[in-house]
Image (spheres, helix red, strand yellow):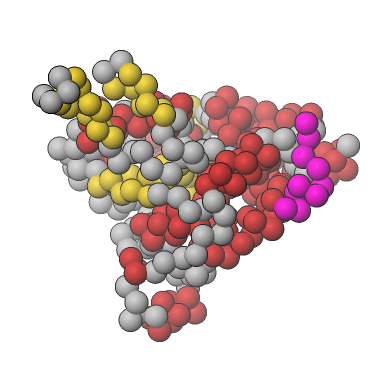
């Protein structure tokens, strides 16, 4: 079944209401908010690389409130253990059996703050749940809530005592973004509302969690023309042949780009993907999956600049071809 034009209009209306709701808290960051909800409705996870105090926690809380969901915050530290994330089985003497106590990962939106400060062993505790939406403890599988999304953060400046995320874990994030500092006008609005602390903001729910699950399933049915698949394939292949890149984007990256393009198309009120959807998401979806050659990195080459060049050099199909 393919999404209809009427369903696309319904999807777009709710998506825009969700974005406008969170925009009351994260002022002037509409593009990042749209990326966040695109990741959520594509059943993916978001990596935020940003400075302290830019609103990452407020962003996660506002998204959860907008979809009437639950949110938890895990502060990653060097002494954090995998069980502190997933939960542990504790022996109950009265019942003479082990009882599973759920960890903070059992929420709709989980904020993994400064994820690169924990050891690789602890970071890996998120791999299963991010990919399969369940946790296995002592051989027993426990499903997490629906919808489920991890928003992980890391500080791009302070790297002392941190553990760089391995490529396998970076590949699990459907996209990477940065909130950044607000502009002058937004800063003035934030200062005018300084009487209310950030954690005191309570947003009204726009939809229920069940509606979000329905929207995510509906986004899968957006039409993708073979010419769009070919365009995405050529983009991904170009990341592997670029001279400045040691390791290009994986097949998972190509699938992520198609999934998010479908969601963005529906959010724009269309039941089909056009090349502009792919162009808008290529950098946030693919750039963090690239491993840059050390010499090129030393010369100032970044993954974002490589993706920009690839988009220039890779001709897209015409919109007419993509609609057919």
Quadrant the N terminus occupies? top right
Quadrant the C terminus occupies? top right
Q: Is residue 112 magenta?
A: no
Task: Indicate the position of residue 243 as horizontal and vertical percent values.
Answer: 54, 31
Instruction: Please name whichever residue, 215 or 36, is drawn nearer the observer in this view of the structure.
Output: 215
Q: Residue furthest front?
A: 94
Q: Of helix, strand and loop, which mostly describes the magenta segment? A: helix
- Up the image or down, 10 lies above or below 101; here it is below
Task: Indicate the position of residue 74 as horizontal and vertical percent values.
Answer: 28, 45
**Is 90 placed left or right of 316 in the picture?**
left
- What residue sits 34% from the left and 22% below the top? 136
- What residue sits 44% from the left and 30% below the top? 133
Task: Indicate the position of residue 8 as horizontal and vertical percent values.
Answer: 75, 48
Q: Residue furthest left?
A: 93
Note whether residue 215 is visible. Answer: yes
Instruction: Please name whichever residue, 280 or 90, is drawn nearer the observer in this view of the structure.
Output: 90
**Is 202 placed left or right of 224 in the picture?**
left
Question: Which residues are the magenta region?
Answer: 1-10
Instruction: Please name whichever residue, 157 or 83, is drawn nearer the observer in this view of the structure.
Output: 83
Instruction: Please name whichever residue, 271 or 155, is drawn nearer the observer in this view of the structure.
Output: 271
- What residue sits 76% from the left and 47% below the top? 7
Q: Residue furthest top?
A: 139
């Amino acid at each position: 079944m393919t999404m209809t034009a009427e369903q696309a209009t319904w999807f777009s209306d709710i998506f825009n209401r969700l974005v406008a709701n969170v925009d009351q808290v994260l002022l002037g960051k509409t593009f990042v908010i749209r990326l966040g909800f695109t990741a959520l409705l594509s059943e993916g996870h978001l990596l935020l690389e940003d400075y302290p105090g830019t609103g990452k926690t407020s962003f996660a809380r506002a998204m959860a409130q907008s979809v009437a969901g639950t949110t938890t915050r895990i502060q990653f530290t060097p002494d954090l253990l995998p069980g502190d994330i997933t939960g542990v089985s504790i022996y109950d003497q009265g019942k003479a059996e082990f009882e599973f106590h759920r960890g903070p990962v059992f929420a709709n939106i989980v904020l993994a703050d400064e994820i690169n400060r924990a050891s690789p062993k602890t970071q890996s505790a998120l791999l299963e749940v991010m990919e399969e939406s369940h946790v296995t403890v002592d051989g027993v599988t426990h499903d997490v809530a629906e919808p489920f999304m991890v928003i992980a953060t890391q500080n791009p400046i302070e790297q002392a005592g941190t553990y760089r995320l391995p490529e396998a874990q970076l590949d699990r994030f459907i996209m990477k973004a940065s909130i950044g500092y607000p502009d002058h006008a937004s800063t003035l609005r934030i200062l005018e509302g300084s009487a209310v602390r950030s954690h005191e903001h309570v947003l009204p729910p726009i939809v229920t969690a069940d509606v979000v699950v329905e929207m995510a399933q509906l986004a899968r049915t957006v039409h993708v023309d073979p010419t769009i698949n070919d365009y995405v394939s050529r983009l991904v292949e170009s990341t592997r042949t670029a001279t400045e890149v040691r390791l290009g984007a994986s097949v998972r990256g190509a699938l992520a780009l198609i999934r998010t393009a479908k969601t963005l198309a529906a959010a724009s009120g269309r039941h089909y993907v056009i090349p502009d959807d792919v162009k808008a998401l290529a950098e946030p979806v693919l750039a963090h999956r690239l491993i840059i050659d050390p010499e090129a990195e030393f010369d100032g080459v970044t993954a974002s600049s490589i993706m920009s060049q690839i988009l220039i050099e890779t001709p897209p199909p015409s919109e007419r071809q993509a609609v057919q």
